[in-house]
Amino acid sequence: MPDIYRITALLNRSQAGLYAAAQAIPEDSWRKPPSPGAWSAAEVFAHLTMVEEAITAGMARIIAAPPKGLPLWKRVHFPARLAQIRQLKRKTPIPLDPALVLDKAESLSRHTALRKRALDLLSENAGRDLGAYRHKHPFFGYLNFYDWFCTIGYHELRHSEQLQEIVEVFQK
């Protein structure tokens, strides 16, 4: 059974890096894209919120029923760690919800509440082996419950780098 504490530590570390980068972005620049066609910090947080919400709600729904069996070949997948690498450019399959593009304080508050839900789901199920619960990721293949939560952390580390780039643009 995977170490829930290791996954929790990854989520806490990624969130701390994300918030450190966010704090360095001035409020008056929060909704401004750093360049034409790029996302603003507010849009990055909207995207992260949508992804984490989908994963947390989806996993909660999936583990409420017995796991579905998958053939071995479908259980082979790319490592969740790849979500961290910014050089692997991918367009999100989830369209950005403009209603989630919020001011800085609201973005951070919403993300904090959502993270609490994710961590609660992990801790509530710490005694169960949820490795048999799988769902298809649009790029990586069928990930198990634990890989999905690692993906949240690695995805957040990726976007922390993006926020750092935004910080550098606005500091010039």
Image (tube, rainbow, N blue to C red):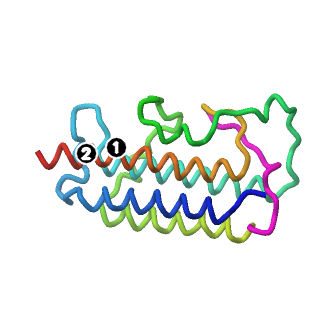
Q: Which SS type dominates the magenta stretch?
A: loop
Residue underneath mark 2:
166
Give the side of residue 37 with respect to residue 52, left or right.
Answer: left
- Three-letter code, disc 1: Gln
Q: Nearer the viewer, residue 121 or 95?
A: 121
Give the SS element for disc 2: helix
Quarter of the image that includes the C terminus = top left
Quarter location, residue 141:
top right
Q: Confirm or deny contact between disc 2 and disc 1 (CB under 8 A).
A: yes
Query: How many neighbours does mark 2 have within 10 angstroms: few (below 14), some (14-19), or many (20 or more)?
Result: many
| Outermost residue toward the left in this view | 172
Identify the residue at horizontal 19%, vertical 52% (top origin): 29
Give the SS element for disc 1: helix
Give the side of residue 10 with respect to residue 73, left or right.
Answer: left
Give percent across and percent down for residue 74.
79, 31
Identify the residue at horizontal 20%, vertical 46% (top origin): 168
Give the side of residue 97 with respect to residue 31, left or right.
Answer: right
Say if the magenta span includes residue 86.
no
Say if the magenta span includes residue 136.
yes
Give percent across and percent down for residue 56.
62, 56
Give percent across and percent down for residue 164.
29, 48
Identify the residue at horizontal 16%, vertical 47% (top origin): 170
Quarter location, residue 1:
bottom right
Q: How many marks?
A: 2
Give percent across and percent down for residue 55.
62, 51
Please tell me the numbered disc located at residue 43: none
Above or below, 169 against 140 in this view is: below
- Three-letter code, disc 2: Ile
Please tell me the numbered disc located at residue 162: 1
Instruction: Specify start and end residues of the magenta stretch as a single range.
Output: 126-138
